[in-house]
Image (cartoon, rainbow, N blue to C red):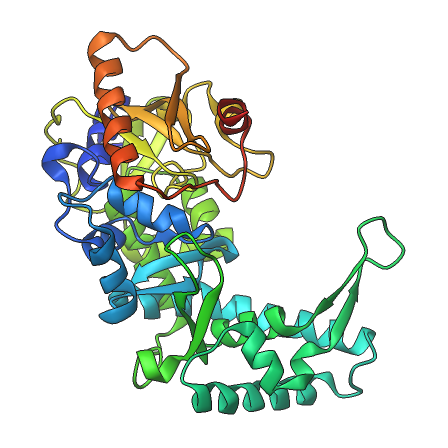
Amino acid sequence: MANRRIGVEERRARLALRHHLAPEARAAGPVEVARDLVGLHGTDPASVFLAAWARLLAPELEAIQQAMYEERALLRILGMRRTMFVVSLDLLPVVHAACTRAIAAQQRTQLARMIAQAGIADDPERWLRDVEEETVRALAARGEALAAELSQDVPRLREQLHLAAGKPYEAKVNITTRVLFLMAADGLIIRGRPRGSWISSQFRWAPLEKWLPGGVPQMPTEAAQAELVRRWLASFGPGTAADLKWWTGLTAGAVKRALAEIGPVEVGLDGGTGLVLPGDEEPVPAPEPWAALLPALDPTAMGWSERAWYLGEHGPALFDRSGNVGPTVWWQGRIVGGWAQRDDGEIVLRLLEDVGADASAAVEAEAERLGGWFGAVRVTPRFRTPLERELTA
């Protein structure tokens, strides 16, 4: 039986403080933000910067870029749910061992099968290893390169796969992206500074050894999975085993094994039972009233599979059909609306419930602050959601 009840208001207070969203809890730097949120969702490059902006005492674009591309204290890695994350250096080996190695093995088998089906090689595994070795040599010679530059140096990267033959969406695509994706998952190369501005998704590639001498430190898989679960509980707890299975992308068996090693404490939640780390049962102080504008794919909004306690009934307007969240407006630990940026730069808001005059004023102030930070930059989320589309129509 659960020892203590943690109600919705206390869960929202924990979220505000541990995710650096309440003004008194804002972080000093982007590495602290990424570490305390167990990674920043990196599929949409703009989301990394906007998630950091919302949580920093002094959100400076240059400081975020410095941490990512000069200090290399934040690294982009394929991780939980086969999704791209930007993680702190200390979390890199954990995510790699807990998630990425298995993804790489599965993707290698799939790509080899596609190579054989396309008639590119009779021995696809050998052919793929040869192409990877040639690509590593080409990248070492250049120092860093775009995918298009590497495909010039390694002609076999321009071999084509015929996808969805006979279907309306069939296509022929170069193998370049899939090979580089696999090489990154295997820890051979890494995505570096993008071509263009901070919202660009066209990344330069670099040898991982250049960024991280010695490569990714190796960990046993089960130890890494337990550490990943422990970190999630520290940042997102209380949560459920279902939350953990969804967020990590691990099997139910792996989550169960990790929890058995950690020995979490059960607590009562509204409508069920949750888990916290041992010693983390004590109440937390309620923060001062706060508002936040969080970006599409923000790690807080995507942090749990069971979202009613902070999302309410707003999911259909704010999530797309694949489960990707759009830009959200928060008040006191819950989602109360959405926002978007129009072509002229204006930040437009839509509150989906009556939050009162004080809350509305705080939200408007955040919108003004964000608009000033954007300057001339225009951001459209990679995954469009119903409300975001409506606000920019």
Q: Residue furthest right?
A: 166
Image quadrant assignment for residue 295: top left
What is the count of numbered marks?
A: 0
Side (left or right) of 359 relative to 108: left
Image quadrant assignment for residue 345: top left
Residue 5, image x and y in percent?
Answer: 24, 26
Residue 349, image x and y in percent?
Answer: 38, 21
Q: Residue at x 18, y 44 (%)?
A: 56
In this rendering, the answer to whether 164 lies above or below 27 is below
- Residue placed most toward the observer, 261 or 248: 248
Q: Is residue 5 visible?
A: no
Side (left or right) of 35 relative to 152: left
Please identify the quadrant where the N terminus is shown. top left
Please identify the quadrant where the C terminus is shown. top right
Q: Residue at x 68, y 84 (%)?
A: 156
Residue 219, image x and y in percent?
Answer: 35, 75
Q: Residue at x 33, y 67 (%)?
A: 92
Residue 211, image x and y in percent?
Answer: 32, 78
- Residue placed most toward the observer, 267 or 185: 185
In this rendering, the answer to whether 123 lies above or below 84 is below
Q: Is residue 384 visible?
A: yes
